[in-house]
Image (cartoon, rainbow, N blue to C red):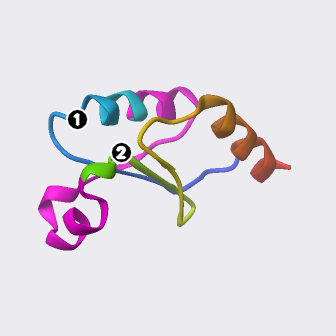
Amino acid sequence: MTSHHTRLYTRPGCHLCEDAEQILIQHGLAPELVNIDDSPELTQKYGCCIPVVEIDGKVRFRGRIHEMLLRRLLAAVEA
């Protein structure tokens, strides 16, 4: 399996973010957690849209992760 740089934009107490992290881990990814509250730029950019999942430099999901789309995305990159 290819290693993917995965970044999860989150903030403390975000239950959707915790769910997203677990889904990413279940699919073999090791997300770098980025607290948007640590950066005014990120807070302005993502605000209420978290979690935001970035894989290999591209934003792939905002809010809930659709697992079937994640599987297809990972399979396409592997091919």
- Rendered position, 18 above or below 35: above
Up-down relation of residue 11 to residue 66 (above or below): below
Q: Which residue is mark 2?
A: 51
Q: Given the current orientation, which residue lies at the most extreme front position?
A: 48
Q: Secondary structure at mark 1?
A: loop
Left or right: 43 as drawn, with respect to 68: left
Q: x, y percentage for residue 65? A: 51, 36
The overriding secondary structure of the stretch rendered in magenta is helix
Name the kind of residue labelled 2 in the image.
Pro
Q: Which residues are magenta?
A: 21-47
Disc 1 residue type (three-letter): Cys
Q: Is residue 17 magenta?
A: no
Q: Which residue is mark 1?
A: 14
Pick whichever, 43 or 34, lies toward us: 43
Q: Position of residue 5 (x, y in %)?
A: 52, 57
Q: Residue furthest right?
A: 79
The residue sitting at 60% across, 30% down in the picture is 67
Residue at 64% x, 39% y is 70
Direction from residue 71 to residue 63 in the image, left or right:
left
